[in-house]
Amino acid sequence: NWIGLNNLFGDSDSGDMATTGILIWSGAKAGAAPIANTVVTDNSIVGGNHFGIWAVHTTKTKLKNNFIRAVVPVYKAAA
């Protein structure tokens, strides 16, 4: 997949208010269970995003063979 500039207006529910290529978030504020065992592979994330991949309230996320050009390539916060 080729992912360009994304999340232009932010996502106030997740707390990610910057441009982001891929956002993985389960809704921790709403009491949702963490997203588990997500595999993110073979992506080209380009186009000037601040975050390449934003993964919050996730467990066992696997990243493989991704080309990421972003200020913060991967942002992960504990579940």
Image (tube, helix red, strand yellow):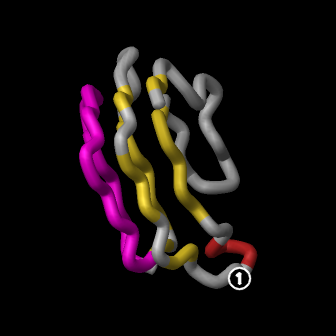
Please tell me whether the stretch drawn in magenta is mainly helix, strand or loop.
strand
Q: Position of residue 16 (x, y in %)?
A: 53, 46
Q: Position of residue 71 (x, y in %)?
A: 25, 31
Residue farthest right in this picture = 30
Q: For residue 45, which quarter of the picture?
A: top left
Please say if 73 is above or below 44. Answer: below
Total numbered circles: 1
Q: Which residues are magenta?
A: 59-78
Q: Residue at x 39, y 15 (%)?
A: 47
- Residue nearer the viewer, 17 or 3: 3
Please say if 60 is above or below 17. Answer: below
Q: Position of residue 40 (x, y in %)?
A: 42, 53
Say left or right for 29 vs 72. right
Say left or right for 77 vs 16. left
Amino acid tagged 1: Gly
- Residue nearer the viewer, 9 or 2: 2
Secondary structure, mark 1, is: loop
Q: Is residue 70 magenta?
A: yes
Q: For residue 69, which quarter of the picture?
A: top left
Q: Is residue 61 magenta?
A: yes
Identify the residue under disc 1.
Answer: 31
Q: For residue 62, which quarter of the picture?
A: bottom left
Q: Residue at x 47, y 31 (%)?
A: 1
- Residue nearer the viewer, 61 or 7: 61
Please say if 39 is above or below 58. Answer: above
Q: Position of residue 75 (x, y in %)?
A: 33, 53
